Image (cartoon, rainbow, N blue to C red):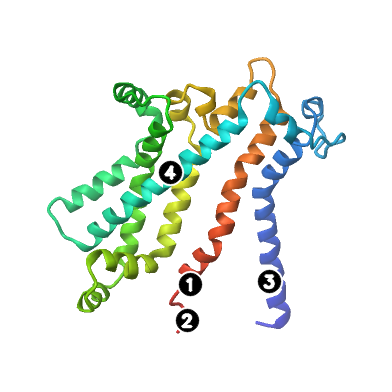
Amino acid sequence: MTTTRIRRRRWDLTSIGIVIAALFLIPYLTMVLGSLKPRSEISRIPPAYLPRDWRPGNYVDMWHTPETPLPFNIVSTLAISILATLLVLAAAVPAAYHTARRRFPGRAVFLALVLITQMLQPTILVTGLVREFFALGANDTWFAMILVNAAFNLSFAVWILHSFFAAIPPELEEAAQLDGLSRIQILVRVELPLIWPGLITATIFAFVSAWNEYAASLVVLTTPENQPLSVALTKFVGQYDTAWQYVFAISTLGIVPVVVLFAVIEKRLVAGLTAGSVK
């Protein structure tokens, strides 16, 4: 293959990558630009892509709207998402480690049931969940939504971590036992550093799922101050009128923590995925 053909192929691949990236980024760019427009300009026909009257003040005004107590909604979303993610990891790590290292009766059935629970959605179980939380006196609380999000994200975390634990040679654990390490020390000091990609994948999945959860939050959390951003956002969408400038602004605000999460853990994710690839 000549140098000219190599360069042409490289430019072709680069062009395809730019087009694909643009297809994914244009909706987000539209959302950001919409958050900087007045309401009248958003509903204008035909609409203008770029704002004619730039309104960065929308990001200030949205904090003082009567529809929703936005500061409380952000705190609620952060608290539920972070605590639910930590609960998922706390339960998934020992469960995945035990199923990967031990052959116990019913192991295959247990893993199958874990996978089946991933097929269920909070929407179809919301009535039962509400009745249970009323019986426990936990309805309309962060605790209820932390349990819901943790329960529905736990199965994926167990499965992904199980595959990572199973890929670690058992001889490594046996060598650690000969060095006098206990099982907990082996898990913390030997196994966990080797499954960073799995831990990060489970963390991202659990956090993003909890951050975006809507159906159960809409029914379980009835107090406006307790509701997450996904529910508070709908308060700006009315039957006859919609405050699109605030919908776009809050949506833009809502993706910031997810972007920050990816930025913070990107180096660890790449380092874990490439570990051992070069001798």
Q: Nearer the viewer, residue 65 or 33?
A: 65
**Camera-nearest label, 1 or 3:** 1
Residues packed near mark 4 inside 10 Å, few (<14), some (14 to 19) or many (20 plus): many
Q: In the visual, does 210 lie left or right of 192?
A: right
Q: Tell me the residue at 16%/60% (across/down).
A: 103
Please give the residue where the numbered disc 3 appears in the rendered image: 10
Alpha carbons under labels 1 and 4: distance apart: 30 Å
Residues packed near mark 1 inside 10 Å, few (<14), some (14 to 19) or many (20 plus): few
Q: Nearer the viewer, residue 224 or 114?
A: 224
Residue kind at label 2, given as amino acid type: Val
Q: In this figure, what is the number of numbered marks?
A: 4
Residues packed near mark 3 inside 10 Å, few (<14), some (14 to 19) or many (20 plus): few
**Residue 128 locus on image (x, y percent):** 32, 24
Please give the residue where the numbered disc 1 appears in the rendered image: 274
N-terminal of the pair, mark 1 or mark 3, is 3
Alpha carbons under labels 1 and 3: distance apart: 24 Å
For mark 2, give the secondary structure. Answer: loop
Residue kind at label 4, given as amino acid type: Leu
- Picture disc at residue 175: none
Alpha carbons under labels 2 and 3: distance apart: 25 Å
Q: Tell me the residue at 69%/34% (across/down).
A: 248
Please give the residue where the numbered disc 2 appears in the rendered image: 278
Q: Tell me the residue at 61%/26% (across/down).
A: 69
N-terminal of the pair, mark 1 or mark 4, is 4
Q: Give the quarter of the figure containing the N terminus.
A: bottom right
